[in-house]
Image (cartoon, rainbow, N blue to C red):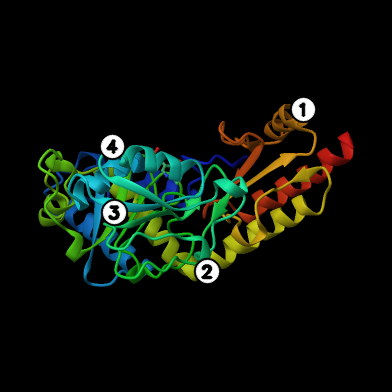
Amino acid sequence: PVFNFAAGPGMMPRDVLRQAREELLEWQRSGMSVMEMPFSGEVFQAIQQQAQQDLRELLGVPADYRILFLQGGASAQFALLPMNLLPAGATTDYADTGHWSRKAIAEASRYVRINVAASGAARDYRQIPTQADWQLTPGAGYCHITSNETADGLAYHWLPETGEVPLVADMTSDFLSRPLAVERFGVIYAGAQKNIGPAGLTIVIIRDDLLRPARPETPSAFSYRVQAESNGRFNTPLTYAVYIAGLVFQWLKRQGGLSVMAECNRRKSAKLYEAIDGSDFYLCRSCALDRSRMNVCFHLADDALTGEFLRQASEQGLLHLKGHPAVGGVRASLYNAMPEAGVDALIAFLHAFAARHA
Ligand code: PLP
């Protein structure tokens, strides 16, 4: 078997892909493929509604939050968030915890003033700043965090306290990997390509009172309010991607929901970190308390062996283990669909490679 450790698009549940293949030509005696269905027709509307309902159930999304299925990926949200929430010149708080927070900050700084409320820079991005290190701006428009730093291998295992200021999170790489207190957030957004479905689909979960009119220059198709008011049908939605996401939500329900996924993800990542920490051959530099359970990032003590490590891993069907170019080293992404057998195979390879090259 082959195991895909890519950071994104990541591995999809095999059952979902099989079901999609089965239904590709004809969906449930409808006479057509979901790809061909008019988005305003009853059949597709039912598919979309079911997907929303299943997601609401999985995450426990309260009634005063809307779920939007948008297009454009998480990078588009870096700009759309300030454009939808705040007037020009408004001040926001951002936590800088790694590569993707810096991307979010750089893009948002074209639209709002940014106060870096907490930064991992001083500790070389090995740690999420603790609450005591935060300098929040009273009256900020929102406070933005990146709940899982895909490139750096860090994650929040707690939530910052922001008082009246709405907490906003980019959850692209850990969405649906664990239960979530949605009511602690004003907005949650996530690109689909890790734990949800096909790239391009972007989920935004937003509290009703934040559905303000977007800045006038915002394209209507990217206005949260316009999309909420038209139930995502202002323009043609990503119909096929929404259908696949719906299959993933049903798969997650069949697995037992997000608590079961969280335990599974904890177990998978813990055994991999244990193998890394237990060997002088490999190094994981991130603080144990803040380690990501989705993206396990580490280095070989002798960096010169990394190329050979990746080549041999690939030969054994352990694919796409190369670290993010900005960080280097090795990264094993363990999204929901990665079976425990994949992690076991990787651990066996770590031991064998170290023994061969020690
Ligand atoms: N945010 C995080 C945490 C990510 O991991 C990524 C992509 O890997 C993005 C944002 C960017 O997503 P997209 O490529 O969908 O714009």
Splitting the image into 4 quarters, where does residue 327 fall? top right
- Of discs 4 and 3, which sits in the foreground? 4
- Of discs 1 and 2, which sits in the foreground? 1
Image quadrant of ligand 1 equals: top left
Residue 11, horizontal then vertical, whole percent: 51, 45
Name the residue tied to disc 3: 204
Residue 261, horizontal then vertical, whole percent: 52, 64
Q: CA distance from mark 3 to mark 2?
A: 24 Å
Name the residue tied to disc 2: 260
Amino acid type shown at disc 2: Val
Does the rendering let one see residue 257? Answer: yes
Mark 4 near mark 1, Cβ–Cβ under 8 Å?
A: no
Name the residue tied to disc 4: 110
Is 65 left, or right, of 199 in this rendering?
Answer: left
Q: CA distance from mark 1 to mark 2?
A: 39 Å
Q: CA distance from mark 4 to mark 1?
A: 40 Å
Splitting the image into 4 quarters, where does residue 80 fall? top left
Sequence-first tag of 3 and 2 = 3
The quadrant the N terminus occupies is: top right
Specify few, some or many for label 4: CA neighbours under 10 Å numbering under 14, 14-19, or 20 or more. few
Q: CA distance from mark 2 to mark 4?
A: 40 Å
Q: CA distance from mark 4 to mark 3?
A: 21 Å
Q: Which mark is residue 304?
A: 1
Residue visible at 48% across and 59% down? 177
